[in-house]
Amino acid sequence: MSTTKTKVLGLCKKWSSCLKSDLLSGAVSKNSQIRTVTSSSSTSAGGNAGILAAEFYIPHRYVSQAELEKFDKVSSGKYTVGLGQSQMAFVDDREDINSIALTAVDRLLKRYNLDPKSIGRLDVGTESLVDKSKSTKTTLMQLFAPSGNRDIEGATVMNACYGGTASLLNSVAWVNSPEAHGRYAIYVACDIAVYEPGPARPTGGVGAVACLVGPDAPLALVPGARHSHSVDVYDFYKPKMSSEYPAVDGKLSQSCYVTAVDDCYAGTISKLEKIRATQIKSVEEAFDHVAFHSPYNKLVQQSFKRMLFNDARRLVSRGEALPDALAALAPFASLPASQTLANKDLDKLLSSIGGDLYKRMVGPSETISKNIGNSYTGALHMNLMSLLGDAHAGGAHLEGKSIGAFSYGSGAIATMMAFKARNPSKKSTLFSLSTIAKTLSVASRLKERVEASPEEFTNALILREAFYGKIGATPAGSIDNVPAGAFFLKEVTKEGGRVYAQK
Ligand code: ACO
């Protein structure tokens, strides 16, 4: 087996001036050192492919869900307890999917001193399309133009909230292929989730995640452990080309999501049992942490409890006794699956069990999404950012931990994956769990934002409605609401081209 060596430059000179102010102290090397990445020229990248480095973008403004309850004149607690959400991020017409993706990828490249020439693949997942042909992926190529690197595969993938996960899986497959030649992939998971006024509106949100993918990763995807569930259903879709708003059957989308959890969890458990050559009795034996796609936090809580219910069903089907913690589920555990969906008695019982386990296993991954809302295809990946950046569970604490990740995109396709958190075998590498945690600095980034009133939130969405599909136009939203260093939309030319600038 022959081996190729590829030199990856730490940082080109042009970039170094803009980097100084942007580097997080101690998070990454400030030297323009030459590092050497060695990869096999055959189909293997050396194993443990996954997330090497991670960045995210969240907007400057958010609206409080408690204030929104008052504004919408719904009962107190409906959004904060009923949906489990605290805050919702939003943008007006000054920012679009391309600008937020540009900001996330720009941060990733700069904060990790990555040479743009070291990237050979770029996949973007989004459903917030602004053009029916020109992709966000190709818009992002403006970040690579100064380096002269045009040899970057990948495109934009669209399937509701699943495109980001498809992009991750594409990136990992490419890194493990002979096409990589020792280069890295980047995947981006991003969306701007907006709903027309009504019960779905408080389940909006905005965010973009950009991750570097390569071998010997701190967050490695476990090969052979994932399980998917894909069906043809109209639970959430966007049939109106003239509107940004989706058509949504809320109740159907909830039951499709939960059915996908059942199916994916059962499949993943049986694959993990084969890999580990042992029976798995509980979610705790399967994983140390679980992160979910999070349309709103209550559905995440319900889905984790559903996994406990699946544990009870599996034990009963194997003729094993239920542990004390699950004993109350016995009357439901042998019912046909269809009778356990939308079963109010079971839902009530599940809401009363497993609270501490939820806090320990899922709590560290829920911080960002509870405070920005649903970033659609970004949501699961944002939740992984929360976990990686969590002060108590993230960073070095994660070493050796197993992480389950559930992704759901309406229409529908869902996948449950398993990750292994590890420190890379190369001690010299910049890419470690600690570096990721420091770079993400989740808590301080959430604090840096400003609260806006429900009126400002509503006005921002009115601006977006008025601007949607416009050509030969300049956005009306103030650049004051764009954080320093972020990209924003300057204009849409009369031909329909979109022009961006960086604040
Ligand atoms: N205090 C506490 N809880 C309350 C209160 C209150 N004052 N009022 C209502 N609730 C609870 C309800 O009991 C319900 O709880 P449950 O889920 O345990 O049954 C919950 O709040 C939601 O209230 P509902 O009246 O059932 O539903 P609503 O009409 O508000 O719609 C929905 C909620 C369907 C999630 C809506 O916001 C929606 O359609 N969102 C978009 C679709 C979506 O997110 N789907 C999920 C998967 S697909 C995706 O990611 C896009």
Image (cartoon, helix red, strand yellow):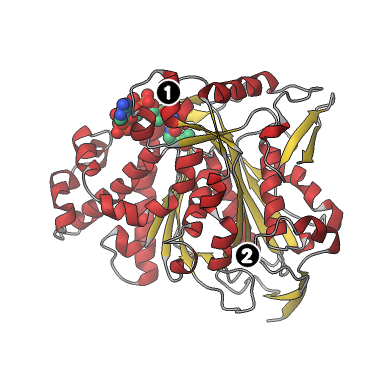
Mark positioned earlier in the residue sequence (1 or 2): 2
The C terminus sits in image quarter: top right
Query: Image quadrant for the N terminus?
Result: bottom right
Seen from the viewer's position, the closer of residues 65 and 211 is 65
* Residue 428 location, quadrant: bottom right
Tell me the mark number nearer the camera, choosing from 1 and 2.
Answer: 2
**Residue receiving disc 1:** 199
Image: 94 above or below 333: above
Q: Is residue 241 visible?
A: no
Q: Is mark 1 in CB contact (under 8 Å) with mark 2?
A: no
Residue at the spot 49% in from the left edge and 53% down from the top edge: 386
Determine the CA span between mark 1 and mark 2.
Answer: 41 Å
Q: In which image quadrant can residue 246 be found?
A: top right
Q: Residue at x 34, y 44 (%)?
A: 301
Q: Is residue 16 left or right of residue 220?
A: right
Which structural element holds mark 1?
Answer: loop
Tell me where residue 15 appears, x and y as whole percent. 81, 58
Q: Amino acid at mark 2?
A: Ala
| Amino acid type of the residue tagged 1 in the rendering | Pro
Question: How many labels were placed on the picture?
Answer: 2
Q: Could you say which disc has been placed on residue 27 in the image? A: 2
